[in-house]
Image: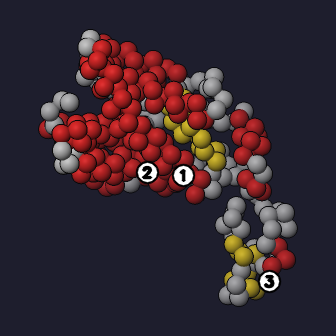
Amino acid sequence: MARCEFCGAEVDFPFICSYCRRPYCVSHRLPEAHECPNIIFARPPNYVREVFEDRLEVPEGHVRPILTSELKQLLLAWLVLGFCFSVRDLTTPRLFFTTLLISLGTLGLGFIGHELAHRYVARRLGCWAEFRVWPMGLIMALIFALASGGRVIFAAPGAVYIFPRSPFSYRISDRENGLISVSGPITNIGITLLFLIISRFGTVFNLIGTKGFYVNLWLAAFNLIPFGVMDGQKVFNWNKTVWALLTIPAWIILFTLPVI
């Protein structure tokens, strides 16, 4: 037995609003009927984006994207990271293009999976979320890769920006932030295990699997660094035990691997 949040009537089987997650009776089940504070999220995505565009918190150093399409921004970031992970073979054109194709395949699954995991969890928590490219991050990734010969990769080409669930709320709780943030590295760790299995299936698969294993482990470990706007900082603020259980093994394994 529950009570309607709007009129207080007792209800055996209440309707749960998809936008504010509260129980209502049959008469007040619709967002309009109970004056839902999150009714804006019942509108088309473009409308939501326009409403929040001006108040979207952009981390220091980030700029609003030039490319308007989320898909275009994901593709741009994917191509730049694929190039950075192939820089070691830049002086050998034939080998470079082979490495680039492998990097795009292995990195593509890891990078896009990582960002879409953030996006999915955020939306499941009732927020609006979409990927935005970080131009300075792309430039830094290229500089680090070229200067180090591909040995150091600055893997921060952009991020999934989160709109709070309510138009009257300007922040997301530490728990929600932690859950959204940890989903990306966990996805990379899962993909790492997938590529580890693939590497056991012969010569060609060994090359692809080994590369995929290394790239996704690096993405997970790098993003778990507890600094600034990194996923690791948000996970650390939410639950230090979860952060340690993911981060310490990832970095230990990464440092004990031969450079690929």
Q: Are marks 1 and 2 in contact (CB under 8 Å)?
A: yes
Q: Earlier in the sequence, mark 1 or mark 3?
A: 3
Which residue in the structure is indicated by mark 3?
Answer: 9
Q: Residues within 10 Å of mark 3 (few under 14, many from 20)?
A: few
Q: Are marks 3 and 2 in contact (CB under 8 Å)?
A: no
Q: CA distance from mark 1 to mark 2?
A: 9 Å
The amino acid type of the residue labelled 1 equals Tyr
For label 2, the SS is helix
Q: Residues within 10 Å of mark 1 (few under 14, many from 20)?
A: some
Which residue in the structure is indicated by mark 1?
Answer: 120
Disc 3 versus disc 2: nearer the observer = 2
- Please tell me in which quadrant of the rendered image residue 36 appears: bottom right
The amino acid type of the residue labelled 3 equals Ala
Q: Nearer the viewer, residue 183 or 38?
A: 183
The amino acid type of the residue labelled 2 equals Ser
- Can you say which quadrant of the picture contains the N terminus? bottom right
Which residue in the structure is indicated by mark 2?
Answer: 183
- Can you say which quadrant of the picture contains the C terminus? top left
Residue at image coords 65%, 36%: 56
* Residue 37 image offset from top left, x and y in percent: 76, 58
